[in-house]
Image (cartoon, coloured by chain):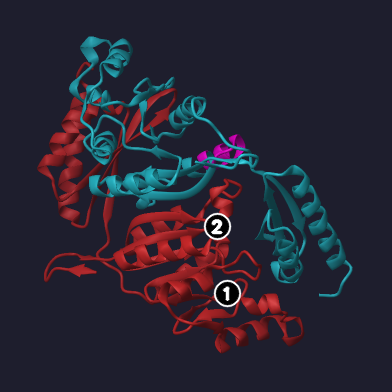
Chain colours: A red, B cyan
Amino acid sequence: MSQAAEGPKIVTAAILVIGDEILSGRTKDKNIGYIAEYCTAIGIDVREVRVVPDLEDEIVTAVRALSARYDHVFSTGGIGPTHDDITADSMAKAFGVSIDHDPRAVAILTEHYGAASLNEARLRMARIPAGAALIDNPVSKAPGFTIGNVHVMAGVPVIMQAMLDAVTATIPTGTKMLSATVPASMGEGRIAAGLGAIQQDFPDVSIGSYPKMLDGGFATDIVLRSRDADRLAVAVRAVEELIASLLVTPR
Amino acid sequence: MSQAAEGPKIVTAAILVIGDEILSGRTKDKNIGYIAEYCTAIGIDVREVRVVPDLEDEIVTAVRALSARYDHVFSTGGIGPTHDDITADSMAKAFGVSIDHDPRAVAILTEHYGAASLNEARLRMARIPAGAALIDNPVSKAPGFTIGNVHVMAGVPVIMQAMLDAVTATIPTGTKMLSATVPASMGEGRIAAGLGAIQQDFPDVSIGSYPKMLDGGFATDIVLRSRDADRLAVAVRAVEELIASLLVTPR
């Protein structure tokens, strides 16, 4: 976490998606986009995403790399009751701590299932690395957990979303990145030179150009991002003037 | 690429998504799921995915890590004409080769735009690392390229998909991973013990358990994967028998 005396406060994060089903393409991930948009809105910059299989070594390597580099890591997947749910044990290994049935988690599951139905498999969901804080799961009760700077959440989107609400309420966020989109009814090739010049004039505003197909032709969304609302507004005006001038110019 | 004399042929790949817009959540990625499913269908195992920002150092680091580890890397994004399109230059740096306007690519763009409209920005899309093979772009002409084992494709899905068709036609694929799904109208907690036992009996079949919300309750898809159709069929039968037995057993 870096913070200048007067400058914006930057909080960074990575997303770690754990699951063979995403890598095989059977399940289309819905969590990356959700977490990314959510973090941007509350002032956390997502800087990297990784998707890894349900293999302990792969999870451990990715967790260590990402947790060392970013302020926070949000992981999804692999905390259920079945044999292929190895995320909790892998997190314990990554942080070099023990793992066992956590009394707090056992109590939650006992209340939810009743002692008679809390079989060994369900009890597996109470395995939490030593020293971790629990993340509330209002949907299906089995909790996530935070160990170090890693927030370990379920893969089922509705549960993950509830856990993300819970966990982000507890962590400090940074100065929000503001953004504005200027649409242009032309391809990037006509805009590029002028846009590059504006980017040079505004090194403190990040200017991205995103082509898309529209009515069989190309259009472009120009997205400007800055933590300074005034600078953002001035840069937006410059881009709008560029687009207006190109609309009256032969290609 | 590993290949036993008589065993299945395994071909591995990683996906590298390049783009600030994915990390900010503004654009929801549609390429990861598409490439993953496509690769599985043709006999390429996707083992890892990374999403990195439009920063040269980040791209170079990721390309080197992934290309050293997997048979193929499929990258998407950052090959357009604007200042934020730095993928081609980053790939050249990752492989330690020079980059310049490629005569083959210049010819394609000249034919498409006409010499008068081929401005400097559009010409930027002809910057191809030395030694790279071009990937045909039937949609908007500006080509992708293959350098080493890295296949560099556009980010716009319709273009990426056409490039993926072109590039996968040229590379050897492995023995296809076959899969079957057994649906179960119950949560994972009831299935887990029996499923774990079946997994022990079938170490050569990968068995995954995927919970989902259905009609307000939980259901589970059990996905079995193997390159051996006979073993897969026997394992599927074992899982079906497990589910049938649970349906007549009190929870």
* Chain of the residue under the numbered disc 2 shown in the image: A
Residue A238 at x, y percent in the picture:
16, 38
| Three-letter code for the amino acid on which mark 1 is drawn | Pro
Label total for image: 2
* A3 or B224: nearer the viewer: B224
Farthest-out residue, front = B5
Residue A153 at x, y percent in the picture:
50, 68
Q: Residue at x 82, y 63 (%)?
A: B242
* Chain of the residue under the numbered disc 1 shown in the image: A
Q: Residue at x 14, y 65 (%)?
A: A7
| Three-letter code for the amino acid on which mark 2 is drawn | Gly
Circle nearer the viewer, 1 or 2: 2
Q: Quadrant of residue A147?
A: bottom left
> Where is A24 relative to A104, above or below?
above
> Where is A176 relative to A226, above or below?
below
User: Magenta region's main secondary structure?
Assistant: helix
Tag on residue A138? 1
Residue A246 falls left or right of residue B249: left
Indicate the quadrant containing the C terminus of chain A: top left, top right, bottom left or bottom right.
top left
Q: Residue at x 26, y 27 (%)?
A: B130
- The magenta span reads B35-44
Q: Which sits earlier in the primary sequence, circle 1 or circle 2?
A: 2
Residue B221 at x, y percent in the picture:
70, 56
> Where is B161 relative to B90, above or below?
above
Query: Magenta stretch: residue B239 in it?
Result: no
Residue B5 at x, y percent in the picture:
61, 39
Element on which disc 2 rests: loop
Residue B231 falls left or right of residue B45: right
Q: Quadrant of residue B108?
A: top left
Whether residue B26 can be seen here: no
Q: CA distance from mark 1 to mark 2?
A: 23 Å
Name the residue beneath numbered marker 2: A19
